[in-house]
């Protein structure tokens, strides 16, 4: 090989490297870095800093039509009466009242049944005739979250918990739900009719 060919080869390699390097770097970037780079190039503002759930979705329809691999959740009282509202449907569909009572859960805790999926019973009040508080709901959600993480639950469907007969405000409940499940991989689908 003569000196002229060596110089041509070096020039070619230099040109190829300078062309490919930015593209190879972009291949090694993760999705967030690529999105940040694209926002920078287009001038689009960055999303707000801090943790986001982004996993809370809303669906109009029957809660029990959700995919069978998704866990279910709803609110009940410590006495496990389930005599009104959607709780009666849970009682009819999944039974297990004695199993729930045997768990001896109190307000702010969460009872659980396995029925080919996890079914969560958020204990938000002492008796069926009482009303829950936002604090008892939050505590119950924290207990449910701990079980979800322990058991690897990543998909959860529920009604607008605490907002039917219990009269809590969905605007506040949804914020609590997002706060409790932020920084988790649990996707929550909220069903309403």
Image: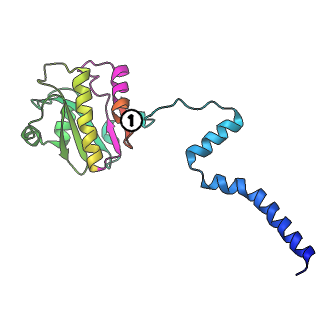
The percent coordinates of residue 133 (x first, y second) are: 22, 20
Q: Residue at x 6, y 41 (%)?
A: 102
Left or right for 42, reference 95:
right
Name the residue furthest front.
3
Q: Which residue is mark 1?
A: 182
Q: Nearer the viewer, residue 63 or 76?
A: 76
User: Which colour assignment does the render follow?
Assistant: rainbow
State the image quarter where residue 155 is shown. Answer: top left
141 in relation to 15, above or below: above
**Left or right: 115 in relation to 33:** left
Give the residue displayed 13% in from the left and 19% down from the top: 129
Crowding near the residue tagged with mark 1, few <14, some 14–19, many ≥20 C-alpha atoms within 10 Å: some
Q: Nearer the viewer, residue 55 or 49?
A: 49
Q: Residue furthest bottom?
A: 1
Where does residue 147 sit, x and y in percent of width and height?
24, 43
22 is within the stretch colored magenta? no
Q: Position of residue 8 (x, y in %)?
A: 88, 70
Give the residue at x 24% y 46%: 118
Residue at horizontal 26 percent and vertical 18 percent from the top = 167
Place of residue 75 in the rendered image (x, y in percent of width and height, measured from the top left): 22, 30
**Quadrant assignment, res 87:** top left
| Circle 1 SS class | loop
The single residue placed furthest to the right in the displayed view is 4
Quarter of the image where one finds residue 136: top left
Q: How many marks?
A: 1
- Residue range highlighted in magenta: 152-177
Q: Is residue 86 visible?
A: no
Q: 175 or 161: which is nearer to us?
A: 175
């Amino acid at each position: 090989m003569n000196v002229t060919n060596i110089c041509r080869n070096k020039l070619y390699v230099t040109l190829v490297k300078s062309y490919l390097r930015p593209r190879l770097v972009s291949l090694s970037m993760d999705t967030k870095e690529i999105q940040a780079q694209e926002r920078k190039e287009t001038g689009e503002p960055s999303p707000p800093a801090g943790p986001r759930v982004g996993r809370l979705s809303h669906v109009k329809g029957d809660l029990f039509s959700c995919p069978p691999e998704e866990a279910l959740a709803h609110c009940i009282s410590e006495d496990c009466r389930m005599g009104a509202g959607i709780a009666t449907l849970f009682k009819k569909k999944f039974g297990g009242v004695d199993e729930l009572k045997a768990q001896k859960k109190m307000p702010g805790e969460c009872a659980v049944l396995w029925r080919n999926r996890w079914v969560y019973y958020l204990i938000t009040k002492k008796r069926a005739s009482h009303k829950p508080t936002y604090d008892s709901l939050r505590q119950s959600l924290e207990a449910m979250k701990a079980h979800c993480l322990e058991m690897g639950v990543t998909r959860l469907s529920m009604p607008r918990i605490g907002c039917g007969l219990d009269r809590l405000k969905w605007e506040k409940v949804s914020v609590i739900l997002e706060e409790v499940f932020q920084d988790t991989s649990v996707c929550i689908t909220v069903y309403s009719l």
